[in-house]
Image (cartoon, grey):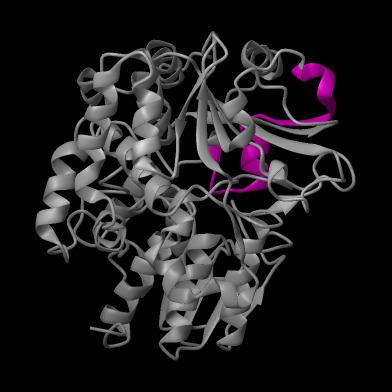
Amino acid sequence: MDAVVVGAGPNGLTAAVTLARAGLAVHVYEAAATVGGGARTGELTLPGFHHDVCSAVHPLGAGSPAFRELRLEEHGLTWVEPPLPLAHPFPDGTAVTLARSAEETAASLAHGVLRDGAVYRRLVEPFLGRWDALAPDVLRAPLAGLPRHPWLLARFGLRAVAPAALLARLFRGERARALLAGLAAHAVAPLGSPATGGVALLFALAAHEVGWPFPRGGSQALADALAARLRALGGRIETGRPVTSLAELPPARAYLLDVMPEDLAVLAGDRLPERFAARMRRYGHGPGVFKIDYALSGPVPWTAAECARAGTVHIGPTFEEIGAALRADHRGVVPRVPFLIAAQPSLFDGTRAPTGRHVLWVYGHVPNGWRGDLTEAIERQIERFAPGFRECVLARAAAGPAEIEARDRNDPGGDIAGGRCDGLRLLLRPRPAVLPYATPDRTVYLCSSATPPGPGVHGMCGYHAARAALRRVFGGAPGE
């Protein structure tokens, strides 16, 4: 056997396909009954209602250099793109929109504060039309050699390194500040943390360049396309096969592990020096999430009409309210008013629910490992912007941190971000290193979201880990 991959999430499958494309014999082991990890879909509430178990909307997936290279559309993947990537509603019944067009977005921000539209255009214009040049350099390990487009990356980096709280000072109106905070909140870090401004900017650019689409049929379709690509290349996948030690696996020239660092230390055992293993065992995790999947009798009754055209809705009306929620999570306190991220795929994909019915996917952040019930707070927050929402609920499936972890071991304590993202932890994970995927054992590699570029369904962690293994073990990656 040339290579063994443990874990069939998007990163593990991408690593496996990358190795198989180089002509290697690859075997994937997955503990769950199906492939997908954080990209799975199931009937969590009622028959015929298909809910995304973890991830739902994939702006970085649609724009992923790895996924584009793999031509997953040939294996059944179809992207569904809503008319609006994102709406962010306010209590007065209006909403700011992140549109495919930067001009349309700027016009939305300029409502009441004309200057903010111009500021937004200046922020994003240098990068419009340059996603294919920028994305490979941004979605990589920051210390891994020279970028392909250094001047473009440097220009982006000058903005991206800033905390969202600093970028927010460029805007005068609350609409623009709230939109920025909601985008930055995807980093699951306080808005004063370095690089949270870069997260906001990257998600905004993704909306303009590739949209915020989702796979037709649910996230499982993306995982299934990756699995089909691997099998077409001769790779093997064994599901329902938990692995507790590399010693259980057949001999291979390389092992790529789509697991968290603490599980890397367990699986590799005495292959790793104790000092390195101890550091992996101490790897820090961030806040968890409390997620609810709803089966609805009809569309969410948003007050703001723009929300009905958006695949994703951010629910938190001010920069201050969103910031307070994120700070509370990191202090180990449940936010009094949670910031919510919601997705409503069935508005645009009729395969997700019975005719006339709908699904809603929504989560808020909570302290890691929290054992309470956030259902009432979540629904109270939705009702602020969609009065009568509860009357539409046919069934709900709530999942706190323990349930989130039970669905995917790579989400310990409900942490869906692969580790803490505050400070520089988003960039330098799981430790500062030129090649963060490698371990002291030349045959063992980490390829989960605990490596750069971090969380999100984009496969780039697996892609870079596989290319590192190809160079170090197999004599070179294709194209090098």
Residue 360 drawn above or below residue 18: above
| Residue found at the very far bottom of the displayed protein | 23
Q: Which residue is at 79% across, 18% downward?
A: 390
Residue 330 drawn above or below residue 459: above
Residue 126 falls left or right of residue 75: left
Residue 197 falls left or right of residue 47: left
Residue 163 visible from this viewpoint = no
Residue 477 falls left or right of residue 458: left
Q: Which residue is at 71% across, 52% downward?
A: 41
Q: Which residue is at 43% across, 80% downward?
A: 19
Tell me where residue 165 appears, x and y as whole percent: 26, 21
Residue 65 visible from this viewpoint = yes
Tell me where residue 132 appears, x and y as whole percent: 30, 63
Residue 424 drawn above or below residue 262: above
Q: Which residues are magenta?
A: 389-412
Residue nearest the viewer, comparing 471 with 350: 350
The quarter of the displayed image where residue 426 is located: top left
Quadrant into which the C terminus falls:
bottom left
Q: Total of numbered circles in the picture?
A: 0
